[in-house]
Image (cartoon, rainbow, N blue to C red):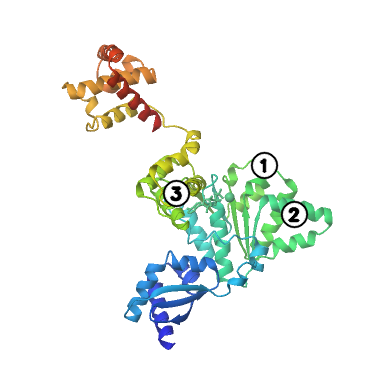
Amino acid sequence: MDNMNNIWENVKSQLEQEISTVSFDTWIRPVKPVAIDNVKFTLSVKAEINRDMLTTKFRSLIESCIAFAAGRSYELHVIVESEDTSASVDPITEANHLNAKYTFENFVVGNNNNLAHAASLAVAEAPSKKYNPLFLYGGSGLGKTHLLQAIGNYFVRNYPEKKVLYTTSEKFTYELVTAIREKTNQAFRNKHRTVDLLLMDDIQFLATKELAQEEFFHTFNTLYEAGKQIVLTSDRLPSETPHLEERLKTRFQMGLLADVQPPDYETRLAILRSKIEEEYFTFDEEIVEYVANNIKSNVRDLEGAVKRILAYAGIERTNTISMELAQKALKEILSTLPQRNITIGVIIDEVEKYYNLPKGSLVTKRRSNDIAYPRHIAMYIAREVLNESYPRIGDEFNRDHTTVMTAVKKIKANLSGDTELQDIIKELVDNIKKN
Ligand code: ADP
Ligand code: MG
């Protein structure tokens, strides 16, 4: 028994060095060791989500720390303390409207959101001191609600005595109107003005409602003066929100404004990998890249793509995700997204790729047939698909326009009897349009 506790203490101190403080406090600190035998080292946790994290994300790390501490290896086994109570809703969670699935743990940080993430974490770790209010803004599906909720969940876990409230400006307005009608204004005020952390989502919708703006102004002041933390989100800056009262704009700008932007390619890859792992799946890297290359709008759409692919796998009763399956799954979504803007440059790229020519070779002066022929094809496609003028095409290829006219005429003449050439051009045009 003692051995077991000693091993676990040692494992904890190793893990503390290995993982972030947030992670450690969330997933490792609350764990209790409960049994050890020849094969297994058993830990007990409070909820399923903790077990899932330990047995997936942290399994190999924990097993190697145990092996290091114990001098031999054990298989990690995790049980949930009270399986039967896991269905009952935590009263705190019920009242504060937080969704436990949004955490700092599963938020992927990239160039597009690092300020918003850092500010949110700072607010969670040192509430009411810095950045009050924190104002997160940016387009839809980019993680504002996720960060807002992560701050709330961090509070609930780390400062159980503090009161947290998550709401939206629409809910706030609706409840205010109801309170006035039912003469429960005092209860409404108590609910909003006695919290330690107020999380207000989508504040832009407050702007058209005068009564709600007035009430929120007083809510804000009461909390602010009492040194309570306020975090707001919006789809735009306060200064760019029409109908938002000046005095609210001023208040909202007192703290820190932090934006979230659409994720770049690298971040999209990281987000996809994390979402796939959350579903306990693996995709080939090639497929992850395919999705990241095609879905650029926002994180919600990336998540949607992963879910769609998994749903297709479910329908086809397979655990292996092939490229074909992924393409099939995304076909409908992709057809509604904007296509790449086709330019002469794109045509040149695709033709060079098709003929395995080094990049840029079509625009050189070289006249050898292995380059001249693909060059003529590219000119023909630029003329036929893009309807570009001969001089414009000539400019792109460093040729004069009569050369382009001759080339296009030649390919046209060849095409009539040459089915192979017809196929090649069809495939090239497909590639160009598809990208
Ligand atoms: P917003 O409130 O900005 O419209 P959400 O916070 O609702 O966006 O995000 C949409 C979805 O994308 C959510 O499921 C959220 O968990 C996920 N998401 C957004 N940003 C990230 C991120 N950086 N890492 C992981 N998941 C993210
Ligand atoms: Mg949101």
Specify the quadrant that holds the C terminus: top left
Q: Is residue 12 above or below residue 20?
A: below
State left or right for residue 45 relative to residue 40: right
Measured in 3D between alpha carbons, the distance from the residue under mark 1 to the one under mark 3, in whole angstroms, is 29 Å
- Residue denoted by label 3: 112
Q: Are marks 2 and 1 in contact (CB under 8 Å)?
A: no
Nearer the camera: disc 1 or disc 3: 3
As drawn, the residue found furthest toward the front would be 317
Q: Position of residue 335 (x, y in %)?
A: 48, 33
Specify the quadrant that holds the N terminus: bottom left
- Residue denoted by label 2: 175
- Residue denoted by label 1: 243
Q: Nearer the viewer, residue 207 or 141?
A: 141
Q: Are marks 3 and 2 in contact (CB under 8 Å)?
A: no
Q: Nearer the viewer, residue 23 or 247?
A: 23
Q: Nearer the viewer, residue 354 or 309?
A: 309
